[in-house]
Amino acid sequence: MKKKRMIALIALGVTVILLAAAFIAVQNILKTDEEQKAPPTLLPEELLGEGDPGERIEKTTYLLMFPRRDRSSIKSIEIHNEYGQYTLVRYTDETFYLAELPGAPLIDETVASAVVASGYVLVTDRVVDSATEEELAEYGLDDPQAWWVLTDTAGKEYRVNVGDRMVSGDGYYCSFEGRGAVYTLGASLESSILAPCEHYVTAAMTSGITQNNYFDIEEFTIFRGNDPFVSVTQCDPEEKLNPDAIVEAKLAYPAGYRANDSFYIGVISGFVSLAGDETAAIVRSEEDYERFGLKDAPYTVHFSLEGNDYDFFFSDVQPDGYVYGISNLLDYSLIARFEGDSMSWLRAGLFNWVADYPLQINITTVSSLRVRTEDRDITFELKHGTDEKENATLDVTSDVVSFDNAHIYNFRQFYKTVIGSKIKGDSSLTEDERAALAADESKAIFRITFNTTDGKEIEYGFWRATTREALLTVNGKGDFYINIDWAEKLVSDLERLIAGLDIDSYGKD
């Protein structure tokens, strides 16, 4: 019995001990939690800030270096860092400008980041209450890498110094001017206080161009180096195939081609709000041009709109995969960065700029046609008028064919064959080979010269290049080819016209 009583007493004692230990543990946990929630002891001029800065630690109460200054109570934010010095100045309750670039449009989100970082300085930790000179040096605050001075609307200044990056990489050691404490601030400083002024500037390159007027561009020219590559102008009203078309363009260089309107519109519409994905640099020396491939820029774009001239200069694709550009529209030299693919039109071949059917000349603008083949040299004189119902009429005369109404219809079909000549691609010949071919009369398949009612003359030629290709030339110079079968159809349809036979302008023969 004694033995059983002893066992019971021992068990009771163990239970008591365990309960006591549990009680002490709970008390320690509660005490620790209370200590965590307790606000820190404030140094002179420190404040408490409520909220979560989203940094290293999770607390509900934070130290505030100085009283919060929101957007409306800030006069300016002067920033010094490895990139130089710049100042954000408030000029309305909601907007800021850069004192060094007063006309530069700024990125709202980036400015907002700087306003919060500089005016609501919630620290993640106070490392030292009163640092010695050795401790300041240890944290990089004897010679800070950056600092900012916030001036509020009452004229009071607040300076914060930024020292070394923390070993953990998630923040920086900082100090408040005139106070001996060392604090830590979050890594968000990198996208505001530690960023260059370019970080705040939108990479916009154009102004004054809108969705309502971009299609009124009078001239659009691309230079490669110092030489014109392509120049596009608007068709005159009488040259338009569709009088209601918003844009109908032709090439002023190389002359004699209609422009590929869809490609051209795609390019010029991009100039409505041409902007890079970021501002790469504000030019401060000639070295900046060289650094971004813009010294002797390989591409220049010039266009005229409403009496104003605009010039843009672009690099080729750089080793980092980007294209860089600069324009003459701004009061400062901003280098914008573009994704290489977004500027691929700069490198596009001439074939992209030319309409599939380059001979689309409105017959009502033609006064005569001279057609030459191996066996023929014929000139057709065209006379335009209207009948009693105001419908357009056409009379044609030549020294080979007499034209009645049936022949006039056939002539129109022959004209359709001519203007239906379709470019298939770039010629496979070299430039020297093309020049030699266009000078060889024995290789000429079909040549046609248009004389227009306004006194202009232009000649198109088709020359036997290969068994598949016929070189197309405009005034003796060629870049493209058409199928040789079509050039031979032109000759065949001319003979059918002379013989009075029906012509199928869409047929193969």
Image (tube, rainbow, N blue to C red):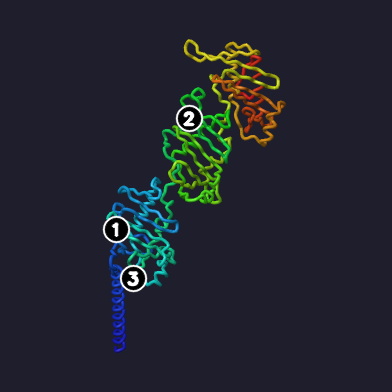
Name the front one of labels 1 and 3: 1
Answer whether labels 3 and 2 touch (C-beta < 8 Å): no
> Around disc 3, counting alpha carbons within 10 Å, would you say few (fewer than 14), some (14 to 19), or many (20 or more)?
few
Q: Position of residue 56 (x, y in %)?
A: 38, 64
Q: Earlier in the sequence, mark 1 or mark 3?
A: 3
Answer whether labels 1 and 3 touch (C-beta < 8 Å): no
Residue at mark 1: 156
Q: State the CA–CA distance, disc 3 to disc 2.
A: 71 Å
Q: Earlier in the sequence, mark 2 or mark 1?
A: 1
Residue at mark 3: 129
Where disc 1 sits, the SS reads loop
Q: Quadrant of the C terminus?
A: top right
Q: Nearer the viewer, residue 204 or 361?
A: 204
**Quarter of the image where one finds residue 399:** top right
**Quarter of the image where one finds residue 7:** bottom left
Q: Is residue 160 left or right of residue 473?
A: left
Q: Earlier in the sequence, mark 3 or mark 2?
A: 3
Residue at mark 2: 247
Looking at the picture, does residue 415 appear above or below residue 202? above
The amino acid type, in three-letter code, at marker 2 is Val
Q: Nearer the viewer, residue 497 or 384?
A: 384
Looking at the picture, does residue 293 appear above or below residue 211? below
Q: Is residue 38 left or right of residue 248?
A: left
Q: Nearer the viewer, residue 202 or 281?
A: 281
Where disc 2 sits, the SS reads loop
Where disc 3 sits, the SS reads loop
Q: State the CA–CA distance, disc 2 to disc 1.
A: 59 Å
